[in-house]
Image (cartoon, rainbow, N blue to C red):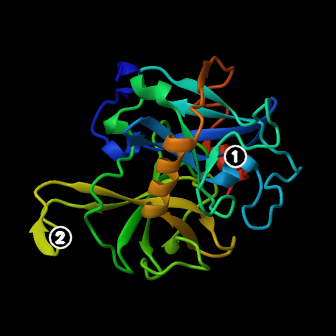
């Protein structure tokens, strides 16, 4: 991995803060909304994962446009932070076959699953083990009430280059599917813009960890990828949906085996994702920023 994505800061930051990526959806030059994505490191290289509704611009159940003027995205911009902020263009329209999605959907659930993947092997010089999600070693069972973190970008990049950590807990029995889908509920004060965020559980040093039926004491902080957040059930509720880790693994394996390698084109853009004029606390207070949820 090159040093392009080695973020330089004055002080300590959690390694998981380098995993989530800020993504914007556009139609032409019109910004429609923003969300979160991340990379999973597969045996065949990085695979970008986010919510399906981020790319379609439509509610994944009702099919209604998410933008108030009905705009549907034709491309997305992923911001990568390092010594310099850079922006990668993703074409969301397959011009050779406009009716087919440019992304890979779940092998059995298809459009019912609000998760999609894009194999991007060419990003191996940018994305490595340290700033991606690993699906290896599914070694722990989580219970209802377990503490989780949704790591993403509510209201854009209000935290600068780093995502915001929203704390919540598992609100439904994690082994039980909901409405026949591999999801569980999370009780979390999340906000629009966090759609597509990875969800993590953490062990602090000294915590007791169950592994293969035995209890162990963690000697260092440990992180565990649980799934992908895809928004709240209702705008007036703190209950949200998390697509399970097993479902993400099925999606990634299918994308690697059958998906088309996608190009993420490095482009120069007039904006800075952390520019003061575009992203300020005043904008958030006035609710001037569009987000997808």
Q: Is residue 193 toward the left or the right of residue 161 in the image?
A: right
Q: Earlier in the sequence, mark 2 or mark 1?
A: 1
Question: Which quadrant, please, contains the C terminus?
Answer: bottom right
Residue at position x 45%, y 60% in the image: 227
For disc 2, the neighbor class at 10 Å (few under 14, some 14 to 19, many from 20) is few
| Residue positioned most to the top | 268
**In this view of the protein, can residue 124 be seen by the observer?**
yes
What secondary structure is marked by label 1? helix
Residue 166 appears in the picture as rendered:
no
Which quarter of the figure is the N terminus placed in?
A: top left
* Residue identifier under label 1: 55
Query: Is residue 103 rendered to the left or right of residue 135?
Result: right
Local SS, label 2:
loop
Q: Is residue 194 above or below residue 213?
A: above
The residue lying at 62 percent from left, 63 percent from top is 109
Q: Are marks 2 and 1 in contact (CB under 8 Å)?
A: no
> Farthest right residue?
69
Residue 233 position in % (x across, y down): 65, 73
Relative placement, left or right, of 186 versus 143 is right
Quadrant in the picture for residue 108: bottom right
Mark 2 or 1, closer to the camera: 2
Estimate how packed mark 1 is, as few (under 14), some (14 to 19) or many (20 or more) residues with alpha carbons within 10 Å.
many
Tag shown at residue 210: none
On residue 212, the disc is 2
Q: Position of residue 266 (x, y in %)?
A: 59, 20
Q: Is residue 284 above or below residue 186?
A: above
Q: Residue at the spot x=27%, y=68% of the render?
A: 140
Looking at the image, which is closer to me, 5 or 123? Answer: 123
Q: Of 281 and 123, which appears nearest the observer?
A: 123
Q: CA distance from mark 2 to mark 1?
A: 38 Å
Percent of width and height locating residue 288:
74, 47
Residue 154 drawn at (x, y percent): 58, 52
């Amino acid at each position: 991995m090159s040093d392009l994505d080695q973020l330089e800061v004055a002080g300590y930051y959690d390694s998981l803060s380098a995993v989530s990526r800020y993504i914007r959806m556009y139609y032409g030059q019109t910004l429609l909304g923003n969300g979160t994505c991340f990379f999973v490191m597969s045996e065949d290289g990085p695979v970008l994962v986010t919510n399906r509704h981020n790319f379609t611009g439509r509610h994944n159940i009702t099919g209604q446009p998410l933008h108030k003027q009905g705009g549907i995205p034709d491309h997305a911009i992923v911001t990568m932070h390092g010594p310099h902020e850079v922006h990668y263009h993703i074409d969301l329209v397959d011009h050779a076959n406009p009716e087919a999605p440019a992304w890979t959907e779940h092998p059995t659930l298809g459009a019912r699953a609000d998760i999609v993947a894009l194999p991007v092997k060419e990003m191996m010089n940018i994305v490595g083990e340290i700033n991606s999600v690993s699906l290896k070693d599914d070694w722990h069972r989580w219970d209802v009430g377990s503490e989780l973190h949704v790591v993403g970008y509510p209201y854009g990049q209000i935290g600068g280059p780093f995502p915001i950590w929203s704390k919540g807990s598992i609100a439904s029995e994690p082994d039980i599917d909901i409405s026949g889908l591999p999801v569980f509920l999370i009780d979390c004060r999340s906000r629009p813009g966090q759609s597509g965020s990875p969800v993590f559980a953490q062990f602090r040093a000294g915590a007791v960890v169950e592994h293969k039926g035995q209890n162990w004491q963690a000697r260092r902080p440990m992180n565990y990828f649980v799934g992908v957040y895809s928004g709240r059930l209702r705008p007036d509720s703190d209950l949200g949906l998390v697509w399970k880790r097993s479902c993400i693994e099925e999606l990634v394996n299918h994308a690697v085996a059958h998906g088309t390698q996608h190009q993420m084109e490095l482009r120069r853009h007039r904006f800075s994702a952390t520019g003061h004029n575009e992203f300020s606390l005043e904008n958030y207070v006035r609710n001037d920023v569009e987000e997808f949820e």
